[in-house]
Image: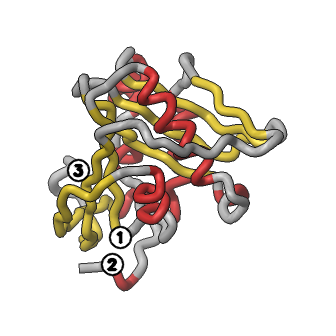
């Protein structure tokens, strides 16, 4: 069955597109025992593990729908960088910086593993992502969030210095084969 004819669940979300035009003055450091490493050799299985674990509760589905071949191509792109957060040697989160639209850098994906949520790591990881993005000297950094994301996502982006540009109501057609739990409140 082709992607356009497969069974889907329709989901309604509001997406907020945000931008940061200058580096923030105050950034928070990672706590003791936490470190962020660039994963230059991040493979498909490793990436899927991050993406699916972090994004399961927030309807991250686009990369799940990609074939392994498509995802491998994205991971080989030198303008896409994957960073892993470790806390005391255990994977605690990740983020992805995309420079394909240079001089803009997009924070494509960002989040914590479920065991790390609520431990004060999210904002510090966001500060790390913002700091790394600005080191390359972009014109601006962009990110988007939506009503399916963690409730602290928007406040953290605002605190870090992102400014909302626009909100767009979107309807997503999420393939049922992905097996995501869709909250009733988001079903269209």
Residue on which disc 3 sits:
1
Q: Residues within 10 Å of mark 2 (few under 14, many from 20)?
A: few
Q: Position of residue 149 (x, y in %)?
A: 43, 64
Between 135 and 52, the one lying in front of the other is: 135
Say which element carries label 3: loop
Which mark's residue is nearer the viewer, 1 or 3? Answer: 1
Q: Earlier in the sequence, mark 1 or mark 3?
A: 3
Q: Position of residue 99 (x, y in %)?
A: 32, 25
Q: Residues within 10 Å of mark 1 (few under 14, many from 20)?
A: some
Q: Identify the image quadrant of residue 6.
A: bottom left
- C-beta proximity under 8 Å, tags 1 and 3: no
Residue under the point 56% across and 37% down? 128
The CA distance from mark 1 to mark 3 is: 30 Å
Q: Is residue 129 shown to the viewer in this render?
A: yes
Residue on which disc 2 sits:
186
Going by the image, does 175 lie left or right of 128?
Answer: left
Q: Is residue 140 above or below residue 58?
A: above
Say which element carries label 1: loop
Q: Is residue 125 above or below residue 9?
A: above
Q: Residues within 10 Å of mark 3 (few under 14, many from 20)?
A: few
Q: Position of residue 185 (x, y in %)?
A: 36, 84
Residue under the point 17% across and 56% down? 5
Which mark's residue is nearer the viewer, 3 or 2? Answer: 2
Going by the image, does 77 lie left or right of 52?
Answer: left
Q: Is residue 167 above or below residue 85?
A: below
- C-beta proximity under 8 Å, tags 3 and 2: no
The CA distance from mark 1 to mark 2 is: 9 Å
The numbered disc on residue 90 is none
Between 19 and 182, the one lying in front of the other is: 19
Q: Position of residue 130 (x, y in %)?
A: 47, 38
Q: Is residue 58 shown to the viewer in this render?
A: no
């Amino acid at each position: 069955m082709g992607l356009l004819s497969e069974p889907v669940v329709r989901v309604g979300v509001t997406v907020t597109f945000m931008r940061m035009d200058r580096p923030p003055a105050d950034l928070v450091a990672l706590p003791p025992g936490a470190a962020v490493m660039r994963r230059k050799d991040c493979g498909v299985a490793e990436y899927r593990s991050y993406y699916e674990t972090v994004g399961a509760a927030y309807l991250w589905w686009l990369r799940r729908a990609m074939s392994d071949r498509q995802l491998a191509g994205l991971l080989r792109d030198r303008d896409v960088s994957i960073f892993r957060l470790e806390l005391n040697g255990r994977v605690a989160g990740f983020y992805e910086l995309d420079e394909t639209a240079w001089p803009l850098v997009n924070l494509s994906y960002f989040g914590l593993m479920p065991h790390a949520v609520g431990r004060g790591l999210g904002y510090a990881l966001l500060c790390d992502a913002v700091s790394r993005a600005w080191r390359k000297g972009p014109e601006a950094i962009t990110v988007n969030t939506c009503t399916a994301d963690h409730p602290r996502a928007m406040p953290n982006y605002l605190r870090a210095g992102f400014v909302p540009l626009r909100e767009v109501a979107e309807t997503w057609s999420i393939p049922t084969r992905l097996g995501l739990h869709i909250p009733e409140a988001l079903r269209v």
